[in-house]
Image (cartoon, rainbow, N blue to C red):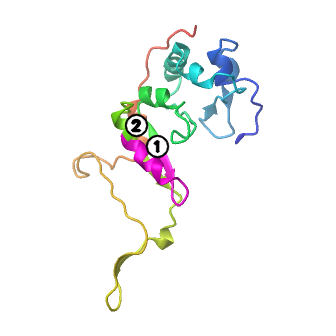
């Protein structure tokens, strides 16, 4: 585990009704960062994720926290995370340069069209910036030596007071909601 904690209780024990959130929330050594581990691996993880208790748990946590990040298994390998992505406010699909399979890129359109994933953002990490070059060479060579990309945004910077960072856009999606009773 990344935080050096036991994984004896967590999301899995919450979803089977064996634990309460306050018993599973762990404060990290980082300011304002709490987390819940996955918990022991259940025999039916996909069934637990689609259980109505998952949505109830998320509603409860949204009443306590400004931002909730859920780390899911790679959707390109298993489809267990799709139900969570469908209810997420801001799902992120992360690809790693020179590592993720090309079929995972094709999976993005399938997530949007077939699984009705909304507001999905794609992040490409692990890009070696030193290899990204564009320009004219001597003689007849011209073009990209590695990589290609594009981006888009909302509005114009002169209209906004300050440019919206990814963090600002994510945090603006969350507002304090009435805390629902954990059942």
46 sits left or right of 12 in the view: left
Nearer the camera: disc 2 or disc 1: 2
**Magenta stretch bounds:** 93-109
In terms of depth relative to the viewer, which is nearer, 46 or 161? Answer: 46
> Image quarter for residue 32?
top right
**Residue name at image x 42 percent, y 38 percent:** 170
Task: Determine if the magenta segment contains residue 82.
Answer: no
Above-or-below relation of 21 to 141: above
Identified at 40% across, 37% down, the residue is 111
Secondary structure, mark 1, is strand
Q: Does the residue at mark 2 contact the one at mark 1 (Cβ under 8 Å)? A: yes
Q: Residue 38: name its quadrant.
A: top right
Give me the disc on residue 153.
none
Name the residue carrying label 2: 111
Q: Position of residue 2 (x, y in %)?
A: 70, 42
Image point (41%, 35%), residue name: 90
**SS for dot 2:** helix
Q: Picture coordinates of residue 177 (x, y %)?
A: 43, 18
Work out whether residue 107 can be spotted.
yes
Residue at numbered disc 1: 93
Residue sticking out furthest to the bottom:
139
Pointer 1 local density, CA inside 10 Å: few below 14, some 14–19, many at least 20 = some
Question: x%, y% of residue 26?
Answer: 68, 29
User: Is 104 in the magenta?
Assistant: yes
Tell me residue 82's x, y (percent): 48, 31
* Of the image marks 2 and 1, the number of the one nearer the N terminus: 1
* Quarter containing the C terminus: top right
Against 181, is 172 above or below? below
Q: As drawn, is 86 to the left or to the right of 135?
A: right
């Amino acid at each position: 585990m990344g935080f050096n904690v036991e994984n004896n209780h967590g999301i899995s024990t919450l979803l089977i009704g064996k634990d309460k959130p306050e018993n599973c929330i762990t404060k990290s050594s980082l300011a304002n960062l709490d987390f819940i581990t996955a918990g022991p691996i259940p025999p039916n993880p996909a069934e637990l994720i689609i259980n109505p208790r998952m949505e109830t748990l998320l509603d409860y946590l949204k009443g306590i926290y400004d931002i909730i990040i859920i780390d899911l298994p790679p959707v390109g390998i298993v489809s267990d995370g799709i139900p969570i992505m469908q209810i997420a406010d801001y799902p992120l699909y992360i690809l790693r340069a020179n590592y993720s399979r090309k079929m995972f890129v094709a999976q993005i359109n399938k997530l949007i069209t077939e699984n009705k994933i909304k507001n999905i953002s794609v992040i490409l990490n692990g890009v070696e910036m030193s290899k990204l070059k564009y320009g004219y060479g001597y003689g007849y060579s011209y073009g990209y030596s590695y990589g290609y990309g594009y981006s888009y945004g909302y509005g114009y910077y002169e209209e906004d007071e300050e440019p919206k960072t990814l963090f600002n856009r994510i945090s603006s999606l969350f507002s304090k909601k009435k805390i629902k009773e954990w059942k």
